[in-house]
């Protein structure tokens, strides 16, 4: 299993590396082969738009806003009869945590986990 996983990883890295190099080559080739630029046409000044004559109408200023009346203060809170508070629910039992294994390279960790699952299914210890 390890050999096939290593082969897949190696192939993937080679593929990505070749793809990166191909993209770089294409980018460099694109920079070298610049498309011929079009000759700029003789600029003709844009025709000025005829101004429309609008009669000026004076608008009256808006009427002044009346001063605001102060808002009344909020009513005092109504006190409710004190009832005995319900006891809080008991805290949930602490969760069991799995012991963490020291970090190993990801590929080996995946293989170890798959072997462990296979051994649980077959009730035999494959890891030894």
Image (cartoon, helix red, strand yellow):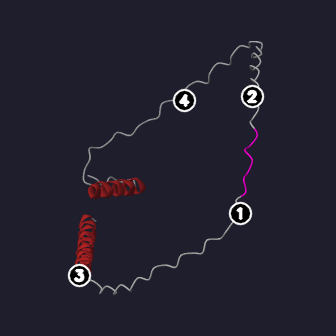
CA–CA distance in space, label 2 to label 1 = 38 Å
Which mark's residue is nearer the viewer, 2 or 3? 2
Of 89 and 30, the residue lying toward us:
30
Residue 63 position, x and y percent, is 76, 40
Q: Which mark is residue 68?
A: 2
Q: Is residue 35 above or below residue 72?
A: below
Q: Residue at x 77, y 18 (%)?
A: 75
Quadrant of the snapshot with the N terminus = bottom left
Q: Residue at x 40, y 53 (%)?
A: 120
Work out whether residue 22 or residue 32 is closer to the camera in this orientation and state it: 32
Q: Please indicate whether residue 125 sits to the left or right of residue 89 in the image.
A: left
Q: Is residue 22 magenta?
A: no
Residue range (magenta): 57-63
Can you tell which mark lies on residue 92? 4
**Which one is earlier in the sequence, the residue at label 4 or at label 2?**
2
Q: Do the residues labelled 4 and 3 touch (CB within 8 Å)?
A: no
Residue named by callout 3:
29
Q: Name the chief secondary structure element in magenta.
A: loop
Nearer the observer: mark 4 or 3; the answer is 3
Disc sitting over residue 55 in the figure: 1
Mark 2 packing: few (<14 Cα in 10 Å), some, or many (20+)?
Answer: few
Please tell me which residue lies in front, 127 or 67. Answer: 67
Look at the picture and state if 25 lies above or below 5: below
């Amino acid at each position: 299993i390890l050999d096939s996983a290593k082969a897949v990883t190696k192939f993937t890295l080679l593929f990505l590396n070749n793809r990166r190099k191909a993209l770089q080559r294409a980018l460099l080739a694109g920079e070298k082969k610049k498309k011929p630029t079009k000759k700029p046409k003789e600029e003709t000044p844009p025709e000025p738009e005829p101004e429309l004559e609008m009669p000026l109408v004076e608008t009256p200023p808006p009427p002044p806003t009346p001063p605001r009346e102060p808002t009344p203060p909020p009513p005092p809170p109504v006190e409710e009869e004190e009832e005995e508070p319900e006891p809080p629910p008991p805290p949930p039992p602490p969760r069991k945590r799995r012991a963490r294994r020291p970090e190993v390279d990801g590929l080996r960790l995946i293989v170890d986990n798959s072997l462990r699952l296979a051994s649980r299914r077959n009730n035999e210890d494959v890891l030894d």
